[in-house]
Image: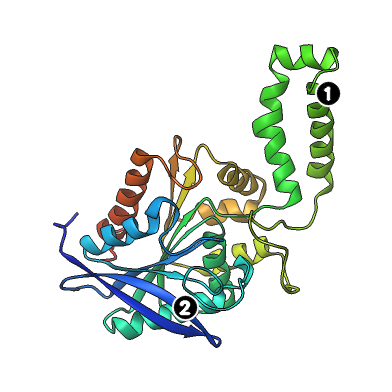
């Protein structure tokens, strides 16, 4: 990794469908690359991220020579307008890309970085737009939840462990709280078998408009369409990450996709959903910056 360079920060406002968005670009003192990083904020969340994660990431990226931008989507933080669900922030991403290039004309290639439904939104952007500016993706704990995936994950990662505990059966036989857990287990089994419509992330309402395809399918189509390098990061202590991994394991198209030579998977067993613990947060930043600067593509590098 190259020696860190001084960083300056540029605040800006830009338009998206009649609303004003707010962003900050962390810029190397002497930009020498046409590559930049754009953080797609998952929601509801502001541009700084949980425990200032996005701010720290962008500054570290710029210190390594890659400009990085974080921004508020419509209805969040310092942006105006009503809040849009993750399925409808494609225009925000496109507006941010335009604003980034307007401020830094040398930028020709952009890596989209997204956590949870931010990762999902990035993939759907690629499904909706043939955006040649996108050079790579960093996708953390992508959101693929439906009632079916949630039920399956609960069965596999919670109830299976409970059924192996002696105290569970003792409480069940005595009519204790385990009786309710048993009923919940049966409900999850039925949900896993039956399936259901997609679910929105915590803090979001339902869909704001009918979509031609379920968002999970649009994510897959966007990922299949993209031919560039992708870094997948999955937390070991996160239900959303487990849902995604289980979903991939049951879908051959997802398996073929993630088996591509340009794709790399990084598992962080001790990390929670937002990488809130210090060591895991630092590891995530280092992994992202290292992937950007060391060259994730066979036979080539970003820089």
Q: Nearer the viewer, residue 127 or 13?
A: 13
Q: Secondary structure at mark 1?
A: helix
Vertical placement of residue 6 versus 56, above or below = below
Residue occupied by mark 2: 21
Residue pictured at 32% horizontal, 62% vertical: 58
* Horizontal side of residue 43 vs 186, given as left or right: left
Specify the quadrant that holds the C terminus.
bottom left
Q: Is residue 240 visible?
A: yes
Q: Nearer the viewer, residue 175 or 160?
A: 175
Label for residue 284? none
Image position, residue 192 (x, y; %): 78, 43
* Horizontal side of residue 262 vs 124, given as left or right: left
Residue pictured at 34% horizontal, 39% vertical: 279
Q: Disc 1 or disc 2, which is closer to the eye? A: 2
Residue occupied by mark 1: 179
Image position, residue 243 (x, y; %): 62, 45
Residue pictured at 32% horizontal, 45% vertical: 282
Q: Secondary structure at mark 2?
A: strand
């Amino acid at each position: 990794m190259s020696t860190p360079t001084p960083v300056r920060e540029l605040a800006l406002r830009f338009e998206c469908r009649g609303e004003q968005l707010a962003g900050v670009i962390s810029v190397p003192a002497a930009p020498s690359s046409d590559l930049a990083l754009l953080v797609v904020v998952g929601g509801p969340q502001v541009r700084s991220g949980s425990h200032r994660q996005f701010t720290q990431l962008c500054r570290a990226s710029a210190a390594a020579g890659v400009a990085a931008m974080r921004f508020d989507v419509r209805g969040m933080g310092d942006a105006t307008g009503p809040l849009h669900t993750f399925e409808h922030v494609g225009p925000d991403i496109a507006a941010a890309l335009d604003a980034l290039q307007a401020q830094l004309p040398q930028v020709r290639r952009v890596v989209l970085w997204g956590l949870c439904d931010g990762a999902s939104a990035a993939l759907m952007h690629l499904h909706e737009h043939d955006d040649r500016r996108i050079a790579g993706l960093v996708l953390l704990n992508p959101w693929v939840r439906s009632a079916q995936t949630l039920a399956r994950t609960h069965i596999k990662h919670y109830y299976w462990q409970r059924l192996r505990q002696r105290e569970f059966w003792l409480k069940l036989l005595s009519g204790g709280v385990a009786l309710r857990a048993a009923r919940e287990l049966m409900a999850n089994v039925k949900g896993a078998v039956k399936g259901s419509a997609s679910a929105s992330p915590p803090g979001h309402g339902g869909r704001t408009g009918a979509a031609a395809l379920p968002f999970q399918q649009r994510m897959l189509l966007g990922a299949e369409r993209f031919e560039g390098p992708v870094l997948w990061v999955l937390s070991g202590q996160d239900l959303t990450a487990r849902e995604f991994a289980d979903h991939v394991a049951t879908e051959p198209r997802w398996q073929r996709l993630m088996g591509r030579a340009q794709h790399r998977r990084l598992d962080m067993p001790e990390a929670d959903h937002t990488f809130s613990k210090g060591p895991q947060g630092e590891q995530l930043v280092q992994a992202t910056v290292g992937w950007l600067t060391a060259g994730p593509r066979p036979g080539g590098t970003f820089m």
